[in-house]
Image: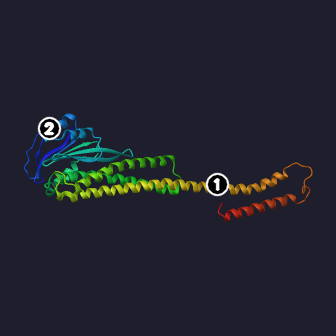
């Protein structure tokens, strides 16, 4: 396990570092609490945290397995919150998990597969002691907000790619690789939507329900997290519609271009059919055929062919087949 940070805070200021097996008897004042951040813990190390902070065994098991959808569980006077992180790796959205144990005088974050550590977040909160002094519920909000804010650059990156693909679709045929990419993005967005729905429910519970460790004064902060999740959900829905539109429009444009080519080929075939038919008739080697002895017959036939072909060309040009 990597213990990223474990500190005792009092009145918004860092007091000292603590170990994971050190039980701190904090005062009743909510401004005094322990914030422990760990990454990829072993079962034995989680057991140490469980014994030190009286964590529920079911919550500890979920935190070790790291295969949960976002949720909020209440165990007595403690909360267990699961959030899913997201990052882009090799042009695909990859997911991690952050489990958060919240008590009146402690908050423990357990990260699995997350590409963004909480070190920067911790420094930002420590820079504003008045905010940190408000207690563990505000730290919980900050962690959830930090996770949700990480969604936006991912969706914006996909949005830029989709808009570029849309412009390319207008100018050229979509290739096999681009069509494959469209279907891959659709699958990724569908999976992302399965994460966003539970995340929205998590934020909603903190806004509407009375839960331990969360003061009513903190609810507007969680409402802000919910709004951020809803914004990302809207963007994902819009992107899925745009991807469908790009694919369908590409098919329509391809059918239109194929129809234009088909009409052009049909028009030229009709024009070429005239000299072919006339030449075919006079190419037959019969003894008794009219006009074979006509002095100017050759030139007359060429003139007729030219005239008829010119009339057909003008006609097809008028109806925009050529």
Rendering coords of residue 194 (x, y %): 35, 48
Quadrant in the rendering for residue 22: top left
Residue at x-position 62% and y-position 57%: 260
Label 2 Cα crowd, 10 Å radius (few <14 / some 14-19 / many 20+): some
Instruction: Note whether 105 is above or below 314 in the view shown.
Output: above
Instruction: Note whether 317 is above or below 181 in the view shown.
Output: below
Looking at the rendered structure, the secondary structure element under dot 2 is helix
Furthest toward the top, the residue is 44
Rendering coords of residue 140 (x, y %): 20, 51
Residue sitting nearer the eye, 191 or 14: 191
Label 1 and label 2: CA atoms lie apart by 77 Å
Residue at x-position 15% and y-position 54%: 132
Quadrant in which the N terminus is drawn: top left
Number of labels in the image equals 2
Is residue 100 something one can see in this rendering?
A: yes
Residue sitting nearer the eye, 307 or 57: 57
Label 1 Cα crowd, 10 Å radius (few <14 / some 14-19 / many 20+): few
Rendering coords of residue 151 (x, y %): 32, 52
Furthest toward the bottom, the residue is 318
Quadrant in which the C terminus is drawn: bottom right
Residue for badge 1 = 262
Q: Earlier in the sequence, mark 1 or mark 2?
A: 2
Locate residue 116 relative to residue 256 in the image: left or right. Answer: left
Label pair 1/2, CB-CB below 8 angstroms: no
Is residue 145 something one can see in this rendering?
A: no
Locate residue 161 relative to residue 101 in the image: left or right. Answer: right
Looking at the rendered structure, the secondary structure element under dot 1 is helix
Quadrant in the rendering for residue 296: bottom right
Rendering coords of residue 157 (x, y %): 37, 53
Residue for badge 2 = 51
Instruction: Note whether 241 is above or below 67 in the view shown.
Output: below
């Amino acid at each position: 396990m990597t213990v990223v940070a474990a500190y005792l805070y009092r009145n918004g200021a860092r007091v000292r570092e603590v170990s994971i097996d050190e039980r701190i008897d904090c005062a009743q004042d909510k401004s005094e609490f322990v914030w422990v951040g760990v990454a990829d813990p072993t079962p034995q190390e989680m057991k140490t945290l469980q014994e030190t902070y009286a964590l529920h065994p079911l919550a500890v098991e979920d935190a070790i397995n790291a295969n949960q959808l976002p949720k909020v569980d209440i165990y007595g006077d403690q909360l267990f919150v699961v959030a899913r992180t997201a990052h882009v790796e090799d042009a695909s959205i990859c997911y991690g998990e952050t489990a958060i144990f919240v008590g009146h005088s402690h908050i423990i974050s357990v990260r699995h597969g997350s590409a963004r550590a909480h070190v920067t977040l911790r420094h930002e909160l420590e820079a504003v002691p008045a905010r940190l002094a408000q207690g563990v519920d505000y730290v919980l909000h900050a962690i959830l907000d930090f996770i949700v804010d990480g969604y936006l650059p991912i969706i914006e990156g996909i949005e830029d790619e989709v808009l570029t693909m849309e412009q390319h679709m207008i100018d050229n045929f979509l290739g096999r690789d681009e069509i494959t990419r469209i279907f891959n993005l659709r699958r990724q967005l569908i999976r992302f939507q399965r994460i966003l729905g539970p995340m929205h429910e998590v934020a909603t519970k903190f806004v509407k329900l009375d839960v331990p460790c969360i003061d009513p004064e903190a609810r507007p902060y969680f409402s802000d997290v919910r709004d951020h999740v809803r914004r990302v959900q809207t963007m994902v829905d819009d992107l899925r519609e745009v991807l469908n539109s790009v694919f369908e429009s590409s098919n329509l444009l391809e059918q239109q271009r194929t129809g234009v080519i088909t009409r052009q080929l049909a028009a030229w075939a009709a024009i070429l059919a005239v000299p072919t038919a006339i030449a075919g008739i006079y190419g037959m080697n019969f003894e008794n055929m009219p006009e074979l002895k006509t002095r100017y017959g050759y030139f007359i036939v060429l003139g007729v062919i030219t005239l008829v072909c010119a009339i057909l060309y003008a006609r097809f040009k008028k109806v925009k087949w050529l």
